[in-house]
Image (cartoon, helix red, strand yellow):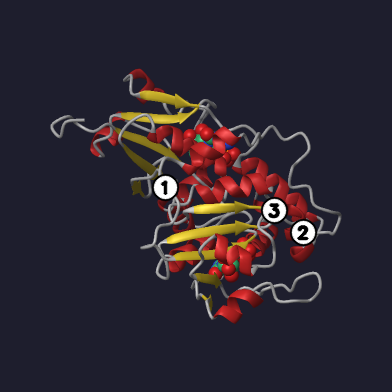
C-alpha cells in the first residue's frame, strides 16, 4: 500500500486467561482483517467481576499475548464493554471477535455499540478449546489429586481438528531454513499448557541464538516422564501453541527424547539449551543430553520464572471453591 494510505488498525479485546491455541488462532484471523493488530486485555479485577477469578495474573496474560507473532500492540486494563469512543481513542478502525455471543455481566451484548457503528467483524471460533473447558478439565484433574488413571490429552469427543492447513497457517510465510549467519538453538520439552514461564525461557534462548527449534516430545513420552494425567494438551495442540510464539522458528513434532549426534548434524544445531527444571533420564537411565554435552554445546538457562504447568494446577486446586 502507498505510504499515504492509512493502515487499518484491528482491535480485539478479551480476557485471554490461560492463553491457548484458540486464542492464537483468533488473533491470527484478526490480523488478516487489517494491517496492525491491537489486543486489549481486561484487568483481573474486571474479569473477576464479570466472569470469575482468572487463573493467570495480569502480568502473565500480557506477556503471553505480547509473545504471539500476529500481535503488534497490547493495551492493558480495558473495560469489558467495547465502546466506539474506546476504539477511536486508540485509533482503531474495526473491532473483531469470534462468532460466539459475548455478553457482559448484565447479559448485554458487549459489542452492541460497535455493531451499530458498523465497525464489528467476526472470525471463526476454534472448535474444541476454551478457557472454561480447560478450567473444568483441570479442576477435575486436581480434584482427583492428579491421580494416575492415565492420560487422555486427545479428549475423546473433542471437536478440535489439527489439519495440516492450520499448522501451515500458524507457521506463516516466514518459514525458512537456517542460513550460515544464523545461530541455531535446539530446546526440547513438553511445553504443556504453554505458559509465561515458557515465554521467559524462550526469550532467554533468543539471547543465545536467533533460530530457535523447539522439539516437542510425544504424548506417550511426556506421560512416561511427567506421569499422572500429563500431558494436558495433546501434541497437535502443543505444536500450535508453540508455533504461535514469535521467538520460535520451527518445531519438531514428536521429537526423540534423546538428542542424538545425527539430530545435531541434521538440524545444524549450535547450542542445546535447557532451563532450571529437572532433566528426566531416558528409559534406560541414560542422559538425553549426552551428545550435546560431549560436543560442549549444552548450556543451562536461567529463565527467572518459577511458573510451571504444575504450579498452574496447584493454583487451580487452591482456588477450587472460587471457580
Ligand atoms: N476465541 C476463539 N476460539 C476459541 C476461544 C476463544 O476464537 N476457542 C476468541 C473469542 O471469540 C474472543 C477471544 O478469543 O474473540 C478472546 O476470548 P476469551 O473470552 O478471552 O476466551 P475463551 O477461551 O472463549 O474464554 P471463556 O471460555 O472463559 O469464555
Ligand atoms: O517443562 P517443559 O518441558 O515444558 O519445559 C520446557 C523448557 O522450558 C525446559 O528447558 C524448562 O527448563 C524450561 N522452563 C524454564 N522456566 C520455567 C518453565 C520451563 O526455563 N518457568
- Real-space Cα distance between discs 2 and 1? 29 Å
Front one among 59 and 287: 287
Residue 151 image offset from top left, x and y in percent: 80, 52
For residue 156, above or below residue 253: above
Disc nearest the viewer among 3 and 2: 2
Name the front one of labels 1 and 3: 1
**Residue at image x 38%, y 49%?**
77
Q: Residue at x 80, y 60 (%)?
A: 228
Judged from the image, the quadrant occupied by ligand 2 is: bottom right
Using the rendered image of the protein, determine whether residue 307 is visible from the camera's viewpoint: no
Q: Does ligand 2 reach within 8 Å of label 2's beta carbon?
A: no
Label located before the other in sequence (3 or 2): 2
Question: Could you classify mark 1 by the number of other residues whose Cα lies within 10 Å: few (under 14), some (14-19), or many (20 or more)?
Answer: many
Question: For the N terminus, which image quadrant?
Answer: top left
Along the line of sight, the residue nearer the viewer: 144 or 99? 99
- Does any portion of residue 249 appear in the rendered image? yes
| Vertical position of residue 98 compared to residue 52: above or below | above
In the picture of the structure, the residue carrying the numbered disc 1 is 69
Amino acid at each position: 500500500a502507498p505510504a499515504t494510505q492509512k493502515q487499518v488498525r484491528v482491535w480485539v479485546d478479551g480476557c485471554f486467561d490461560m492463553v491457548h491455541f484458540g486464542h492464537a488462532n483468533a488473533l491470527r484471523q484478526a490480523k488478516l482483517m487489517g494491517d496492525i493488530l491491537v489486543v486489549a486485555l481486561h484487568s483481573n479485577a474486571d474479569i473477576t467481576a464479570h466472569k470469575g477469578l482468572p487463573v493467570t495474573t495480569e502480568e502473565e496474560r500480557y506477556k503471553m499475548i505480547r509473545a504471539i507473532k500476529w500481535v503488534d500492540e497490547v493495551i492493558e486494563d480495558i473495560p469489558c464493554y467495547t465502546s466506539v469512543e474506546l476504539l477511536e481513542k486508540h485509533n482503531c478502525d474495526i473491532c473483531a471477535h469470534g462468532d460466539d455471543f459475548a455478553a457482559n455481566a448484565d447479559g448485554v451484548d458487549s459489542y452492541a455499540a460497535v455493531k451499530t457503528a458498523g465497525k464489528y467483524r467476526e472470525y471463526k471460533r476454534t472448535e474444541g478449546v476454551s478457557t472454561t473447558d480447560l478450567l473444568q478439565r483441570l479442576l477435575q484433574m486436581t480434584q482427583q489429586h492428579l491421580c494416575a488413571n492415565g492420560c487422555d490429552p486427545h479428549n475423546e469427543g473433542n471437536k478440535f481438528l489439527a489439519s495440516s492447513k492450520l499448522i501451515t497457517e500458524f507457521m506463516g510465510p516466514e518459514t525458512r531454513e537456517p542460513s550460515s549467519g544464523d545461530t541455531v538453538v535446539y530446546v526440547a520439552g513438553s511445553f504443556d499448557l504453554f505458559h509465561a514461564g515458557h515465554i521467559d525461557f524462550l526469550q532467554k534462548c533468543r539471547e543465545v541464538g536467533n533460530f530457535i527449534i523447539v522439539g516437542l516430545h510425544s504424548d506417550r513420552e511426556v506421560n512416561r516422564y511427567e506421569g499422572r494425567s500429563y500431558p494436558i494438551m495433546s501434541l497437535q495442540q502443543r505444536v500450535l501453541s508453540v508455533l504461535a510464539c514469535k521467538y520460535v522458528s520451527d518445531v519438531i513434532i514428536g521429537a526423540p527424547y534423546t538428542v542424538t549426534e545425527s539430530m545435531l548434524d541434521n538440524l545444524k544445531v549450535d547450542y542445546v539449551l535447557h532451563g532450571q527444571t529437572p532433566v528426566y533420564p531416558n528409559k534406560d537411565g541414560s542422559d538425553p543430553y549426552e551428545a550435546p554435552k560431549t560436543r560442549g554445546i549444552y548450556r543451562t538457562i536461567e529463565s527467572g520464572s518459577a511458573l510451571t504447568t504444575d504450579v498452574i494446577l496447584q493454583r487451580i486446586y487452591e482456588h477450587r471453591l472460587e471457580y
